[in-house]
Image: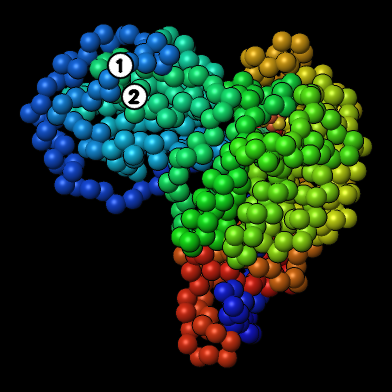
Amino acid sequence: MNISSSFRFCRFTFRKCLSRRLQWDTCDRYYCSKSSSTDQTRVVQLKNKLACGPSFQDFIKSSDKTYDACNDEHEEYHIPECTTARSLKVYFETYGCQMNISDTEIAWSILQKAGYSRTHELPEADVVLLVTCSIREKAEQTIWNRLKHLTALKKRCQKHKPLLKIGVLGCMAERLKTKLLEQEKLVDVLAGPDAYRDLPRLLSLGYRGQRASNVLLSLEETYADVMPVHQTPEGHSAFVSIMRGCDNMCSYCIVPFTRGRERSRPLSSILEEVRMLSDQGVKEVTLLGQNVNSYRDFSEQHFICSEGSTQLSRGFKTVYRTKQGGLLFSDLLDKVSQIDPDMRIRFTSPHPKDFPDEVLQLIQERRNICKQIHLPAQSGSSRVLHAMRRGYTREAYLDLVENIREIIPGVNLSSDFITGFCGETEEDHQETLSLVREVGYNVGFLFAYSMRKKTHAYHRLQDDVPAPVKQRRLEELISVFREEAAKVNMALIGSTQLVLVEGESKRSSEELCGRNDGNVKVVFPKTDLPIQPEKPQMVPITSGDYVLVKFPCRLM
Ligand code: 5AD
Ligand code: SF4
């Protein structure tokens, strides 16, 4: 390794000649609570109280009774006398997409306010909450298995943990309410994505031995006033939820049914949160939503009256009627990116239909909006896209890619694809492979189609591609993706990239890792750098630093 000159400039640290690795993700993502310090005194106090207090049976009135939120407006919150919410510890496990990480932060913020404390160690937990995903069968199966394991654990520890509660939050709670609560009897508490405010009450009902649920979907809930407690590993990057739900009704997708209608969080509350994060030293914010670039804020009178009708990408259409007025995604992006010019802004997950030129130009103009766009294509065949109800053809998608590249030269593109959707032929599949070759993405999230009840495809289409064929097509797609991504990343060789350091690399304590603007993972050796150009004093690189990394002349 040859570091010929390295120096610090403004708040960025510059250095030379380092290596890089690519990020791949072709399966369901799983995030688990991270460990933190424990409060031993409180554990001992709780144990003592539990030992001398009433037994579990004392709290059970009717163990099999199911409570529905709407039937129970006047129930008082109830936590056993010997226990206060303050002494109860919640353990979260988060599955699925970034929205679920954000939901975990919201749910935790609500419970923290109600007096609960948090543990990152399962054996310490009084309440175990799984924040769940329903998007594919495999994601749900993982959670079923986990629930069975946790229920067995609960039975085994009934003596020393008589109050242990298990809850399911999020999409699976919404989709499988009856099955989870009544049929399988695996959980005590269920809260859908719009019912997290109700969690303290639901848990109180749980302590009365009742199975409690609230899976009501809302047209308005954005948790605007709930300041999430951010839990990123090193504290330098954070997710900020800006909208919830989805109106697109892609024919394969369960999300509109589990997360409900699209609604946007008021601009003022988003800006407040981003300002707060900037003050805390956060260096990267990812704006989140199911269709993040369809953001449309009606929270103020003058937003409602504004002229803006839906500005779609050229050649794209929606399944819903054109929306009018409101403050749009380009306005939000403009304001968020001005808060802190040293804070990187990303956003996910967008829909390709919502990329008018205003948004693209803003991304190009603003130094701190990352030049990386996720552009979920789903298929390269216009016939399949039509069956998927995506609202665009292959040609319109490719025109959009061309337009994006014209306005933002050097932009990195990533995408989602589904193989083996209803009626997909070999020819359709080949069109998908050719689209991937033509566009040249650097990151892909690739999935075999998994039929979901309630969706249009479930009711109207035949899931007629056999599982082994879906799998074979998926493998072919992965290998084409890898080839193309390698080409895109080879083009970085010799270039110098600004990398936001995340921390130690997983493989070696001698290495650090971070991401460049295009979201490529970069791994490089740990080293000290001069505190300022020409100054002899050296400091170690730490997470949250920006460093300039020159990629090696050969791939490692
Ligand atoms: N089967 C397989 N993949 C799906 N996705 C959404 N629904 C399904 C399904 N039923 C994929 C899409 C979407 C990503 C989040 O998950 O590619 O963009
Ligand atoms: Fe699902 Fe389509 Fe909405 Fe994405 S845009 S969440 S794929 S319905």
Which residue bears the numbered disc 1? 75
Q: Are marks 1 and 2 in contact (CB under 8 Å)?
A: yes
> In the image shown, does 12 or 468 lie closer to the viewer?
12
Residue 498 figure quarter: bottom right
**Residue 431 position within the rendered picture, expressed as x and y whole percent measured from the top left:** 88, 34
In whole angstroms, how far apart are the C-alphas of marks 1 and 2? 8 Å
Res. 498 mark: none
Q: Amino acid at mark 1?
A: Glu
The residue located at (54%, 21%) in the rendering is: 217
**Helix, strand or loop under label 2:** helix
Q: Is mark 1 within 8 Å of ligand 2?
A: no
The residue located at (34%, 43%) in the rendering is: 120
> In the image shown, does 65 or 319 lie closer to the viewer?
319
**Residue 129 position within the rendered picture, expressed as x and y whole percent measured from the top left:** 39, 31
Q: Quadrant of the C terminus?
A: bottom right
The correct choice, above or below, for 455 with respect to 166 in the image is above
Which residue bears the numbered disc 2? 201
Viewer-nearest of discs 1 and 2? 1
How many residues crowd mark 2 within 10 Å: few (<14), some (14–19), many (20+)?
many
Q: Amino acid at mark 2?
A: Arg
Residue 411 figure quarter: bottom right
- Scheme of colours in the image: rainbow
**Residue 529 position within the rendered picture, expressed as x and y whole percent measured from the top left:** 53, 80
Residue 184 visible here: no
The correct choice, above or below, for 530 with respect to 258 in the image is below
Q: Quadrant of the N terminus?
A: bottom right
